[in-house]
Amino acid sequence: MRKILTMLAALLVAATATAQTATWSHRVEPQGDGLYRIVLEVSIPDRYHMYDMGPYASDGPNATTIVFTPGEGATLEGGVEMLTAPHRYHDEMFGMEIGTFEGKAEFAQNVRLTAAQGSVDAAIEWMLCDDRSCTPPDDLQLTVRIPANAAPAAAETEHAGQADETAATDATTTAQAQAQDAAGSKGMWALVIEAILWGFGALLTPCVFPMVPMTVSYFLKGEGGPAMGRLRAALYGLFIVGLYTLPIAAIILITRAVGGDAVTADIFNWLATHWLPNVIFFVVFMVFAASFFGAFEITMPSWMVNKADAKADTKGLGGIFFLALTLVLVSFSCTGPIVGSVLIKSTQGEFWSPIVTMLAFSAAFALPFTLFALFPSILKKLPKSGGWLNSVKVVIGFIEVALGFKFLSVADQTYHWGLLDREIYLAVWIVVFSLLGLYLLGKLRFAHDSDTPSLGVGRLALSIAVFTFVVYMIPGMWGAPLKGLSGYLPPLTTQDFVMTPGTAATPAAATAAPQKRKYADFLHLPHGLEGFFDLAEAEAYAAQAGKPLFIDFTGHGCVNCREMESRVWSDPKVLSILRNGYVICALYSDDKKQLPESEWVTTDGGKVLKSLGKINSYYARRNYGVNAQPCYILQGRDGKVLVPPRGYDLDVQGFVDFLKRGLEAYDAQR
């Protein structure tokens, strides 16, 4: 309704006011190897602003949309990028955080030629507003022709209404890629795959596997023929997925509706980095591990399980729903820690990630039960419950102990307690997995274990894998990078004894930063790099040194950040460019350091931010639209972003090219 009133007001004003419109121009920049970049530039009239690409809810502002449609001889690579960072603030009228452009703004799309020349159509729609009113939405269609030997094209200008009005486009969506989220596209797929594997693995837990016969017996009593049986089985699977996914989705949607994206991001940031939830998760994991080792039994309250189980005997949809609810409740003692681990990992990415990962987990978890409901005869081929399930339970217990220390490590890093340095963390993991290897070999037994007179091939293979993992970790006690575990271990800067060249203990051959730098007493860069942890301080030094600024939006609890530093930053070519070509500024969005009152920041909504992490997180959202880590910004003179930001991507050469393009763009500013 609010959006409709805004549109009506805009139309009334437009009928009596002088028309204002934006002027668009485009250029083509060759990137090499048949890749070109189309850059659209818009000139916005004085006193007017244009909304960014959103997306926004139906009652939000009219986002700028740009849809590219490839013609013959061309294909699109990636999505539309906002080269100009919008000004982001909380708008009281719309009740949400929005982004706007003033003066000029640039957008880009990568295109690859598949012939000697090609063309790409662009459909653009936007709205201009000033402090009192908005003009009606305007649109433009243009065609960009790309020759194979194109030099950087002179800007071709198009005014609204001057382009070919017959050019058609039916596209209704647009892709925004201002910065890859913390997880990144590859990171999201990794989370989804891990969630699916955990979902399938949960079937083998001793709380879940015995539920299979109950499922089969229920559906064997079904009535209504094969078609009704398939429908009931499908509903059973959907109910299981919904019981796991909908509560998470509800939390996200409610917080978005009440406070917008920033509030939702803050909640999940609190959940992922605050000491209280992390210590609670650590304790929960240790308690569950003790239960898996046989110290005691954890179950949901019997009244709750019995009530759900009793209602599962009823016919119709209600019976199927309560059967699914019974499965979820009974299996909680085994799936609870798995669900917690999956959710916490996903909160380190864009905040829609928890919904996606929980959907993947629950779908994989529900699939076997749906198949058992469809084909009850499959049960005959499954192994019977027995001692092997207890062995699975004990193995999960060891894994719970190892994963639990990750939560304690996050709290330790964000609050600088100094409890879990890297070598202590590694020592715990080495001991835990050594004991697991001995258990698999039958050298370690628990009270509920069955006798194993001989060692099976499966146990032997698993023990070999476990001890191989232990041997791999041992050099890490002396500073080996252990890139395969970089996302799970504390930073190498926390290690006391390091022998590996080029790490935190090795001085870097870079231009020395000033000795007195804010927060450098408790924050450090990896690989001996020197830099800043306060943006204003870094910008001043970059201007003095005549170098571009490399801004690293990162976090102590960010798994992908550690993996990027271990696998990408450690490359000699990357290190050389970072040391010699840039001034580095690392901004931690989850650091809990309370700053003196003189450094507090008041948001546009009037909220006072007192901690270093909240201030950095607010700055990232307001100036760059960044809600997740890692995100890398290359900034030149006057705060201008030199090239499109980059997120989680383990392509080393791609990162080198990203840094080189930034240097070239900085030189072009002179």
Image (spheres, rainbow, N blue to C red):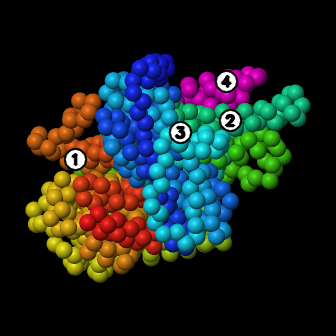
Residue density around tag 1, few if under 14, some if 14–19, many if 20 or more, within 10 Å: many
Q: Earlier in the sequence, mark 3 or mark 2?
A: 3
Q: Which residue is mark 3?
A: 161
Q: In whole angstroms, how far apart are the C-alphas of marks 4 and 3?
A: 68 Å
Question: Closer to the camera, 631 or 593?
Answer: 631
Q: Can residue 196 be seen by looking at this rendering?
A: no
Q: In whole angstroms, how far apart are the C-alphas of marks 3 and 2?
A: 50 Å
Q: Earlier in the sequence, mark 1 or mark 3?
A: 3
428 relative position to 638: left or right: right
Q: Secondary structure at mark 2?
A: helix
Q: Quadrant of the C terminus?
A: bottom left
Residue in view at x 24 percent, y 59 percent:
637
User: Mark 3 is on which residue type?
Assistant: Gly
Q: Secondary structure at mark 4?
A: helix
In the image, residue 474 sits, relative to residue 330, either above or below, namely below
Query: Where does the image place residue 89, in percent across and percent down from the top left?
Result: 32, 36
| Segment tinted magenta in the rendering | 299-326
Task: Choose mark 3 or mark 2, whichever is in front.
Answer: 3
Report if residue 313 lies within the magenta region.
yes
Report if residue 622 lies within the magenta region.
no
